[in-house]
Amino acid sequence: MSQANNPLHGFTLEQIVTALVDHFGWPALAKQIDINCFKQDPSVKSSLKFLRKTPWAREKVEALFVAQKLYQNT
């Protein structure tokens, strides 16, 4: 019940990153969130590895996903 109002509920980090890349593309995503995994030889796999170890970066990615309301399109 506590997840009812959570827009991230039911989404994996991989789904979130993929949706952002589909929406923005890597260059524009790197401008939105300035982290190297989006700028230098970006891939979903390398991004997931970094984001799983870096809570502040993951929070920014999740916040952008919610701000763009991409959860409504998926």
Image (tube, grey):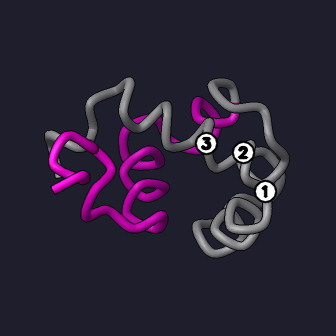
Q: Which residue is mark 2?
A: 57
The residue carrying pointer 1 sits among few (fewer than 14), some (14 to 19) or many (20 or more) residues within 10 Å by Cα, namely: few
- Residue at image position (39%, 68%) is 12
- Residue at image position (83%, 52%) is 40
Name the N-terminal-most of marks 1 and 3. 1
Whether residue 43 is in magenta: the answer is: no
The reply, left or right, for residue 1 in relation to residue 50 is left
Q: Secondary structure at mark 2?
A: helix
Q: Amino acid at mark 1?
A: Thr
Q: Which residue is mark 1?
A: 54
Residue 70 position by quadrant = top left
Q: Are marks 3 and 2 in contact (CB under 8 Å)?
A: yes
- Residue 10 at x, y = what percent? 25, 64
What distance separates the C-alpha of mark 1 from that of mark 3? 9 Å
- Residue 74 at x, y = what percent? 17, 52
The reply, left or right, for residue 11 in relation to residue 21 is left
Q: Nearer the viewer, residue 2 or 44?
A: 2
Q: Are marks 2 and 1 in contact (CB under 8 Å)?
A: yes
Residue extent of the magenta highlight: 1-30
Q: Nearer the viewer, residue 13 or 34?
A: 13
> On residue 59, which mark appears?
3
